[in-house]
Amino acid sequence: MHDPSDILLCVRDLQVHFGSPAQPVRAVDGVSFDIRRGESFALLGESGCGKSVTALSILQLVPAPAGRIAGGEVWFDGTDLLGQSELQMRQIRGSRISMIFQEPMTSLNPVMTVGEQISEVLQQHLDLRGRAGRERSIELLDAVGLPAPARRIGDYPHQLSGGMKQRVMIAMALAGEPDLLIADEPTTALDVTIQAQVLELLARLQQDTGMAILFITHDLGVVADTMDHVAVMYAGQVVEKAARGAFFAQPLHPYSRKLFAAVPGGHKRGQLLETIRGSVPPLDRKFTACRFVERCDEAWLRCHEQLPPWIEQSAEGESHGVRCLRYAPDIDVPAVTPGSVAVVKDSAASASRDGSLVRVRDLKVHFPITKGLFHRAVGQVYAVDGVDLDIASGRTVALVGESGCGKTTAGKAILQLIRPTSGTVHYRDQDLTRLTGKALRQQRAHMQIIFQDPFSSMDPRMLVRNILEEGIRAQAIATRAEQRQTRVESLLAHVGLPVSAAKRYPHEFSGGQRQRIAIARALAVNPGFIVCDEPTSALDVSVQAQTLNLLKDLQAKMGLSYLFITHNLSVVDYLAHEVAVMYLGRIVEQGRVADIMQDPLHPYTQALLSAVPTIDKAAGREVIRLAGELPSPINPPRGCHFHPRCPQAMPECQQAYPDLTLLDNMHQVRCFLYPAN
Amino acid sequence: MRAMIQLHRQFWFWPLLLIAGLWLALLALPPLAGVKAVYLDTDKLIFLLVSGVLLLAGYIRSREHLRGPWRHIFRQRRAMIALVVLLFFIVCGLLDSVHFRKPLPSQGVTQQRYSVKVLSLLDILLDDMRRNVEKTYSAPLATHLFAKETVTLENGDVERRYVRLKYGGRDLTDPASQKWPNIRDLATRGVVVGAIIWLVLSAGLTAIFARHQRQPVAVMAKRVYRGDTDIPWRSIYLSLLLMLILLAVLLTLSTEYHVLGTDKVGQDVLYQSIKSIRTGLVIGTLTTLVMLPFAIVLGVMAGYFRSWVDDVIQYLYTTLSSIPGVLLIAAAILSIQVYIANHPALFETALDRADLRLLALCVILGITSWTTLCRLLRGETLKLREMEYIQAATALGVGQFTILGRHVLPNVMHIVLIIVVLDFSSLVLAEAVLSYIGVGVDPSTLSWGNMINGARLELARDPVVWWSLVAAFCLMFSLVLAANLFADAVRDAFDPRLREQG
């Protein structure tokens, strides 16, 4: 057992309510946990389960008057935080406890320089002014790994990239030399390579300063990499709490196990992913049974009748707590028959391999940078700079890369939503780049798109029925009202939504359901090819699994081809047949998914793969750290675009862009390490 | 039969029925009453606007996502009190927009002839005020003229004294002692009448709501009394009570007095300021009607099509907004004036002439004021065209103009609404300023601007004649304040940025 004085933060039975006192929404309903000094503690859960509200209540930052702390205690280093006045809290915030937020873009004041914002904190808490403050700011920026901090200190936030802004945010949080750092999804908005950098930075800072970290995340992989303790939250409660090792070795709560099962990966190819049925119950009532019972496969009668107790098991001196009746002593637990894993037919086997459905050749999209009264072009943004792709029918090609590499632009250019500067896009034998007006509008029926954000991809002022009918009308697929009605109903059935959904507005649906509607809209015009632009990155893991299952199922049934644009490599591993890795407007490596995932050749692909946080720690992988960030596509580096960040750069890399090397019939790479034979 | 049942479910059914009734009444009732209806251009536009608003209200009722923000507005106490006040102004304005000419007593001629004086329904209601014209200035509630006059007595002597008014306190034998008791009696009568009207009205309303909500009237009344309703009916009833009492007191007093005094030619100032309501409303609403097509079409097109369309439209409104607005308005109004003077045959009555100038003022104000809204709409459309649902529609092969009508326009309408409501009050004020400098409405049109313009000389007198200015100020102030309060509520409800914070 640990020394009690070792405990830095102690949260006991915290209750946070929102809305009217008569029928409050219990966003946080009895959360307890301890954080020891120097420990990193992860609060894990899907969106809406109360993790952020828990963190905000520790600092008394719950938005009032909508929300209020209705009960419980928060002790921080012997101080009762909930009893502190606003004035006293101001002394604690920033100096004893700091917080960093998910969105670095909106957390910094755009009209103050980076240096000013850090010195503000220094002045407030350490009374460091003038020269001393400036020097300390530079030290801090240096500590968070910002290159050339003395120069960067006079920069405004808009001059920094996302990763750099997050570093500045961390520097600001560290300025008060806190004992506890609360990090609310600090890497969610960042690319994997940058995420790896930030995680490593946090781990290093923790070692150097000995502060504790409360890390809020929805990403199991992030937790697996760096955390000491994990607490899983569900519907306002902690349902499981354990040391990392024990948690990853054997998650106890059915919800935690479901979360693990829902994570896609290469080894689950050909199966349907596990999903969690239903959705999080509304929190505006008192619960008399387990909150998870409606969605739990292992529930039995008693789960519906009583509240599950908190049960502590002890293993190797570490306690492993879980809120589930299954683990209660002196209760007969009925055995669970393990559900058989549903198998989905992989369409690749049956797909015809005769030529490609979509053929993209030397696709270029350059945006002119214009200036002055007459829109004189003064430069070009080389967003997409010569992309070749072949997509066979019934196959999925994944387009992978960091944000800003041009993958979304490429997808839109293929669909002619952005007209390409040059190059050709053939669908069957039709060159789409030459079509305009009505002819193009007719061809559009064959190619559809599903967007990332299911909240902005549907007109909020239209009924679902009208949304689905839009394409049917435009392509004159069904001209009579009854025909359209039948078509809408069958589309909804295809994506697993009830017929009654047609008479509702998009905002009445959850993120996952909206993504289904978006898929149904795309299917309305009988397309052969769909561009999926990060369709699952805004969704929770369990919902992502449902969406991926649906996409895979539709592909098997209808023989659809997908261009799957994503930065999530585990999704690629699960879903795609072929992978194309894009860097700064060009494809650097392309091949079958197995080849690329197991044997990446291009140094960029290798780095990208190594940066992905994974759950199974068995393979002792080594993260290849990429220096810096994606260069600007306005002014790409000479020679190979990747050479400034490449760990294996050679002199000739600066001279010219490498030619295509064809390794076997499918695998191709552009790198001087693999000379063309 | 089935078709009929379906029909009344359409959103346009009840509004159209109402509109048809309104137009029928406007067309059929004047001949039945034996008067000659006069439809001024602004009258036609006003009733067109009313019809449009009714249709729109029906449409909004049928769409849940449109109804939501309005429900939010209707639940705010301040907005509803403002709306009650606004309704009184609107009713005045509408009554003042039904014009007709009375028949002249026939003198054996076969054809019926009509008076050249055009009256409105409001004039009939305020008949006393309109007819009781004194000789010149008199103070509010006075019984004597404001200035001493030279009077020749019966015995031939000449004396300077305050002359009794013809109508103000005409029944009093000894004004000095009887005036205030008399006023008190009249005011009490007014309060009672107002309270009775209120009782009848509010009882009727409560009964209707009780039926609507399927509750006994007593329960509904108790809920209203306790303030236990979603819509703040208690506040609405209270403000209604206050307004009705105020109105009743003013009307009863005005049967025997000039409540706000008389102007230089002895006209009742209260009458003038009530008649000015219509002018203010016409300017505030018809101007936006003129402005909207320009602003919406050009703004949305500039934002959506970009390239040269955007350039042309931008240059257009940049140029237009760099010409001083007052200069443009003065030039336009003066040339209209010349046109009217040169073509007297075109106008049957003096009111027709004044009306054309009023309409011209609306048009020119509209032309000079569309640029702000246009700019806002262009910006919003620029944002919208990158929205994914618009790209999805493009990907489905939907035509560009269909996208504009179906996706862009409905999603910028909240901006249009906010601007229209906010602009209303500034336009009412603009009328006053323009009339003051002489390029506003026709001098014969009753308007607050003209009253203020006239007060310029009155304020220079000693003792000061203050009531014209104060009357105009009070009415304008209450209209603009009510409109602003309501506009605030509209903006709160429709501005997505404000909603997210709430």
Image: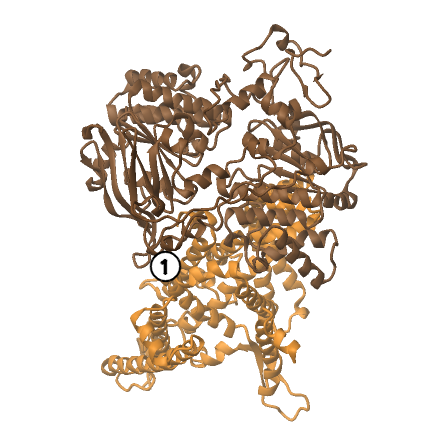
Chain colours: A brown, B orange
The answer to whether residue A206 is visible is yes
Q: In the image, is residue A138 above or below residue B385?
A: above
Q: In the image, is residue B333 above or below residue A202?
A: below
Q: Secondary structure at mark 1?
A: loop
**If the image is split into quadrants, where does the C terminus of chain A sit?**
top right
Residue in front for this viewpoint, B40 or A581: A581
Q: Residue furthest top?
A: A651
Q: Amino acid at mark 1?
A: Ala
Q: Residue furthest right?
A: A429
Which quarter of the figure has residue A87?
top left
Q: In the image, is residue A593 above or below residue B234?
A: above
Q: Is residue B122 left or right of residue A586?
A: left
| Chain at numbered mark 1 | B
Name the residue rendered at 33%, 38% in the picture.
Answer: A55
Instruction: Provide the residue designation for mark 1.
Output: B460
Residue in front for this viewpoint, A472 or A326: A326
**If the image is split into quadrants, where does the N terminus of chain A sit?**
top left
Q: In the image, is residue B353 above or below residue B322?
A: below
Residue B52 in picture, x, y percent from top left: 58, 66
Sort mark 1 into few (<14), some (14-19) or many (20+) by Cα contacts within 10 Å: few
Residue A126 in picture, x, y percent from top left: 24, 23
Which quarter of the figure has residue A128?
top left
Name the residue rendered at 39%, 66% in the picture.
Answer: B231
The answer to whether residue A109 is visible is no
Residue B99 in picture, x, y percent from top left: 56, 76
Residue in front for this viewpoint, A533 or B68: A533
Q: Residue furthest bottom?
A: B108
Residue B374 in picture, x, y percent from top left: 58, 47
